[in-house]
Amino acid sequence: MPGSDFRSEHVRSIGWDILWTVLTFGLYNVYIQSRQIHALNAMLRQDKYGFWSWALFTILTFGLYQIYHEYRKSKDLVALVPGVNDMEPILNVALSCCGFHIVADCLQQTHINQFYGSTSL
């Protein structure tokens, strides 16, 4: 819950996520997506996102669904986390279109961490 004293399972180290993503040539980002989907469903208190549907649609659309997925996640984070810029979904779409979806994921993870009371990277 927001403001709790314990460290939530949804709080992640962004630096480690970037390092592991680089070391695994991007494969670790699939795990990051899984964890962010789980975190957003917990934040929303509903099963809005599904890992397997994301994976299937991303493969079937040759990655185009990933751009839409980043937009949806960002829109929900804008609604859930106070102080998030309303233009961030557009920024994340632009980053994803240019192949920098890991940067969009880092921005989103920052907001997930903030929601659960963590400000460290």
Image: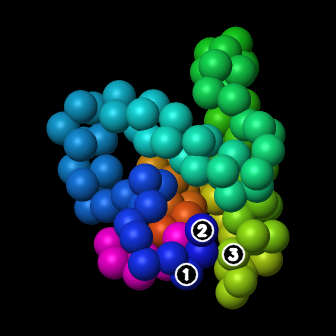
Comparing marks 1 and 3, which lies closer to the viewer? 1
In the structure shown, which secondary structural element does the residue marked by tag 1 occupy? loop
Say the numbered circle drawn on residue 3. Answer: 1
Say the numbered circle drawn on residue 81. Answer: 3
Any magenta on residue 116? yes
For disc 2, the neighbor class at 10 Å (few under 14, some 14 to 19, many from 20) is: few
The kind of residue on which mark 2 rests is Met
Q: CA distance from mark 1 to mark 3?
A: 12 Å
In the structure shown, which secondary structural element does the residue marked by tag 3 occupy? loop
The kind of residue on which mark 1 rests is Gly
Q: State the image coordinates of residue 23 (x, y, percent, origin top left).
A: 18, 38
Q: Is residue 30 above or below residue 74?
A: above
Say the numbered circle drawn on residue 54. Answer: none
- Number of marks in the rendered image: 3
Judge by depth and name the residue closer to the eye, 39 or 27.
Answer: 39
Judge by depth and name the residue closer to the eye, 87 or 117.
Answer: 117
Left or right of residue 120: residue 23: left
* Type of colouring: rainbow
Instruction: State the residue at coordinates (71%, 83%).
Output: 82
Instruction: State the residue at coordinates (44%, 41%).
Output: 32
Q: Are marks 1 and 3 in contact (CB under 8 Å)?
A: no
- Range shown magenta: 115-121
Q: CA distance from mark 3 to mark 2?
A: 13 Å
Task: Name the residue carrying label 2.
Answer: 1
Predominant secondary structure in magenta? Answer: loop
The kind of residue on which mark 3 rests is Val
Q: Are marks 3 and 2 in contact (CB under 8 Å)?
A: no
Report whether residue 36 is seen: yes
Judge by depth and name the residue closer to the eye, 89 or 118.
Answer: 118
Q: Quadrant of residue 28?
A: top left
Farthest bottom residue in view: 83
Between disc 3 and disc 2, whose residue precedes? 2
